[in-house]
Image (cartoon, rainbow, N blue to C red):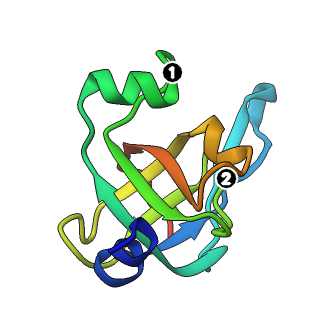
C-alpha cells in the first residue's frame, strides 16, 4: 500500500484551527482561536520520529514532538493548531512548528509537518 493509501485508510481524523493574531496591551501580540476549524476531517498519519530524524527533516530550530503525514492539498500552515479526533493521539492538541521543505516544493505527494504538543484551548 502506498503512503497516501496508509494516510487515507489508517490515518487519524483531525481538525485544523488558524490563530488570529492581534495587537494586545502594550503592543504585545494577542493570539485568539476561532471556534470553528479552518479545515475539518483532515486525514493525517501521526508518527513519533527520533530526534535525529526530526533534525534531518525539519532542521535544528524546529521542535517536533509528533510528525504528521497528510495529503499535499491539506490547508495547513505553520503555527496552526491541530486537534486530533481519533486514533492513538485522540483528544491531543498540537501546534504546527515546521513543514518539510521538499514537500513545499512539490516533490512529494504528501506533507510532513513538525508538531509540538500544546495545552492551548482551541475549538
**Residue 15 image label:** none
Image quadrant assignment for residue 2: bottom left
Label located before the other in sequence (1 or 2):
1
State the quadrant of the N terminus. bottom left
Q: Callout 2: few (<14), some (14-19), or many (20+) C-alpha neighbours within 10 Å?
A: some
Q: Is residue 89 above or below residue 116?
A: below
Furthest toward the top, the residue is 60
Residue at image point 53% right, 57% down: 81
Residue at image point 75% right, 34% down: 25
> Residue 89: where, in percent of width, then height?
23, 64
Q: Is residue 99 above or below residue 38?
A: above
Q: Is residue 34 above or below residue 21?
A: below
**Residue 59 image label:** 1
Horizontal side of 55 relative to 38 (left or right) equals left
Horizontal side of 54 relative to 72 (left or right) equals left
Image depth: mark 1 or mark 2 in front: 1
> Residue 75: where, in percent of width, then height?
68, 66
Q: Nearer the viewer, residue 37 or 72?
A: 72
Q: Is residue 29 above or below residue 104?
A: above
Horizontal side of 91 relative to 93 (left or right) equals left
> Residue 71: where, in percent of width, then height?
55, 68
Image quadrant assignment for residue 37: bottom right
Which residue matches tag 2?
77
Amino acid at each position: 500500500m502506498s503512503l497516501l493509501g496508509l494516510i487515507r485508510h489508517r490515518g487519524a481524523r483531525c481538525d485544523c484551527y488558524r490563530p488570529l493574531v492581534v495587537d494586545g496591551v502594550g503592543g504585545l501580540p494577542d493570539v485568539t482561536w476561532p471556534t470553528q476549524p479552518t479545515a475539518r476531517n483532515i486525514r493525517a498519519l501521526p508518527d513519533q520520529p527520533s530526534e535525529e530524524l526530526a533534525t534531518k527533516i525539519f532542521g535544528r530550530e524546529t521542535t517536533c514532538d509528533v510528525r504528521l503525514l497528510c495529503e499535499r492539498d491539506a490547508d495547513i500552515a505553520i503555527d496552526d493548531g491541530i486537534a486530533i479526533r481519533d486514533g492513538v493521539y485522540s483528544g491531543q492538541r498540537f501546534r504546527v512548528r515546521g513543514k518539510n521543505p521538499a514537500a513545499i516544493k512539490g516533490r512529494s505527494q504528501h506533507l510532513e509537518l513538525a508538531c509540538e504538543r500544546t495545552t492551548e484551548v482551541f475549538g
